[in-house]
Amino acid sequence: MNFRSLIFLLFSCVAFAQHNQFPSAKADSIVKRIQLPVIPSYQINVVKLGAKGDSLSDNKKAFDKAMALCKKNNGGTIIVPKGIYKINGPIHFVSNVNLKIEKGAKIKFSDNPQDYLPMVLTSWEGTMLYNYSPLIYAYECNNIAITGEGIIDGEGGKTWKSFKTKENTGKNLSRDMNHNSVPIKDRKFGEGYFLRPQMIQFFNCKNILVENIRIENSPFWCLHLLKSQSITVRGISYKSLNYNNDGIDPEYAKDVLIENVNFDNGDDNVAIKAGRDHEGRANTATPSENIVIRNCNFKGLHGVVIGSEMSAGVQNVFVENCKTAGYLKRGIYIKTNADRGGYIRNIFVKNIKLDEVEDCLYITSNYHGEGKGFQSDISNIHFSDISCNKASESGIVIQGFADKKIRNISLNNIEIKSAKNAISNENAENVLMTDVFIGKRATVPTAVTH
């Protein structure tokens, strides 16, 4: 190695070391530019429109009328007072509306799939298509909110739950259409295909607030932030334990704040996505980026996941000051495979307290061992100040490919008190570890005794 190369290498290592600290100023700048929705002063109480909170009456017409009145008045607040309001069909938002579900109020959706037709343009596991309407659906809306201390119940544990065992034909067809660039207008699913709808989906929306509500019993993903930006999710809670009940799924999403959330989910708590395979790679202009997750309590399958559908790219994610409130399979899980392409970069995770997990920190380019031809680029991943009481399998896992290595990983002040396997690190380069303890921390060496 010549002198010039040595200087460059030293400079690169120093630069990497200097930039692996948690960049609080960058996270703060994202939060500062996120705009809360501006809602006009008009208000309408659904009871005045004939809604009955008796858990039996169908209140679809009253809620539709409330939304229509808000549209006529260029927006406003729909008040849902104490009671259980059954709704046989979806709520479709218009712009400039706050759906305020007051304490003691519950919206309980029907679980009759026919109620969620006609189909709407949506997405299913990373592929755009037409399917059953999400239970709450906002398409191309600005300044929208769901607030209050009430409950949204998706009634997902019976009919919708039964769809899981029947979904493979529809799921595989959707992926074939993705890979073969079938026009979206020709991707018609709905009845007979058994693809469950999301509970809440904001699609091509801007300036969104979801605050303090409780989400229960979703048919599928709970809160899907699709191709939307300037989003605040805070103070909400969950009890949603059906199949694929991800808590929050930002997908092609930009400028997102998730804070003070109490998760209890049957799947990932936060799963950051950016489209699947061919379709995702065609949308690299809209990666998921600038996402701040802080002060949350994790409980469910995984805490924060990036992938596996991330083909348009994921960058600039900041996770800090979170802890577990129960079991997690994995704490932080970054996953992709050789079908995806795209990139995952500039991920910063700080001050995470985990209790018992299967794996603490897991980064893999070979999720499910699937795919070929489109390996993803994973680089600049930084973990600091992380504690875990027990990993029943692995403390730290990094899995790249020999011809596509994971690059620039830093681990600083990591303590895992017990792990079956400490570290599995393959096909990665420039992995920097500082103050990493797995198992019992060593003290001074023992002396020879005579």
Image (tube, helix red, strand yellow):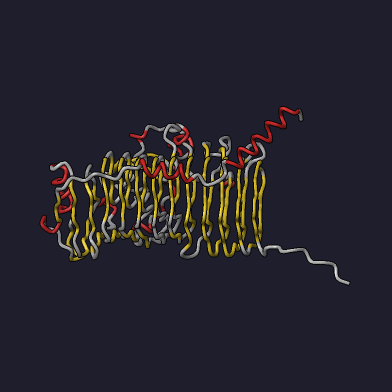
- Please give the name of the residue rendered at 61% of the width and 50% of the height, measured from the top-left corner: 411
Residue 285 vs residue 446: left or right? left
Q: Is residue 165 visible?
A: no
Report the front residue among 113 and 4: 4
Q: Nearer the viewer, residue 314 or 40?
A: 40
| In the image, residue 397 above or below residue 8 | below
Quarter of the image where one finds residue 441 = bottom right
Residue in the picture at 53% in, 61% down: 354
**Is residue 321 at all visible to an observer of this figure?**
yes
Quadrant containing the C terminus is: bottom right
In terms of depth relative to the viewer, which is nearer, 441 or 375? Answer: 441
Could you say which is closer to the camera, residue 123 or residue 131? Answer: 123
Picture coordinates of residue 386, whole percent (x, y): 56, 56
Q: State the image coordinates of residue 26 (x, y, percent, origin top left).
A: 46, 42
Looking at the image, residue 86 sits to the left or right of residue 204; the answer is left
Quadrant (top left/top right/bottom left/bottom right) for the N terminus: top right
Q: Residue furthest right?
A: 450
Image position, residue 191 (x, y; %): 32, 48
Q: Is residue 173 left or right of residue 139?
A: right
Q: Is residue 290 depicted above or below 326 in this figure? A: above
- For this view, does 41 lie left or right of residue 374? left
Residue 234, image x, y percentages: 35, 54
